[in-house]
Image (tube, rainbow, N blue to C red):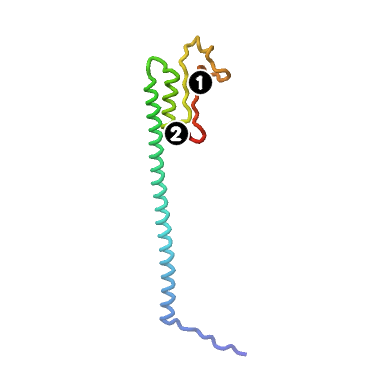
Amino acid sequence: MSRPPSRTLPLSAHTIAIALVLAIGLVLSIVSYRQAREAERVRVENEFFRRADVQHALTREILANYESGLLAMRTLFKADTTPPLEEFQLAAREVMARYPGISVLEWVAAVSGPGRSRRRVPGSGSPGPFLRHPRAVGGG
């Protein structure tokens, strides 16, 4: 038994052109995909930094508002005499209504050295009567 002679197909110009088009198409597809992926990564990174900057500016603005409110309250009560409790309660309610991030304000009466032991809050270890104004859970 003899083998039939193998036929080798000569590479025609047509076959070479098809192979070349496929190879170029594959290379261009890979390059295009990588460029698109890199462009998307850069866009997402830039968007992240833009949002972070906006959030930072907003947080800084909110903290500046709280600080200005507290400084205004300090200026209001900065006098030679201690403000009465009722005046403090009125101002505290207004500040807490305007700045929802402030959750507690305390009023502590000024007590001289000898009077401190008589005015201690039992179990607190701190001098003076404390009056706290916590915000309600629902924000009201």
Q: Which image quadrant: the N terminus?
A: bottom right
Secondary structure beneath label 2: loop
* 40 left or right, relative to 132: left
Q: Which residue is mark 1?
A: 130
- At 44% from the left and 73% from the top, the residue drawn is 22
Residue 24 in percent (x, y) is at 41, 70
- Report the number of numbered marks: 2
Taking the view exactly as shown, the residue that stands out farthest to the top is 114
- At 50% from the left and 36% from the top, the residue drawn is 138
Q: Is residue 58 above or below residue 9?
A: above
Instruction: Point out which mark residue 43 bears.
Output: none
Q: Where on the picture, by quarter, is residue 87? A: top left
1 or 2: tag closer to the N-terminus: 2
Q: What is the crowding at mark 1: few (fewer than 14 residues within 10 Å), some, or many (at least 20)?
A: some
C-alpha gap between disc 1 and disc 2: 21 Å
Q: Is residue 4 above or below residue 79?
A: below
Residue 76 in percent (x, y) is at 37, 22
* 120 left or right, relative to 85: right
Quick one: 114 or 119, which is closer to the camera? Answer: 119
- At 45% from the left and 81% from the top, the residue drawn is 11
Three-letter amino acid code of the residue under disc 1: Phe
Q: Which residue is mark 2?
A: 100
Taking the view exactly as shown, the residue that stands out farthest to the right is 1
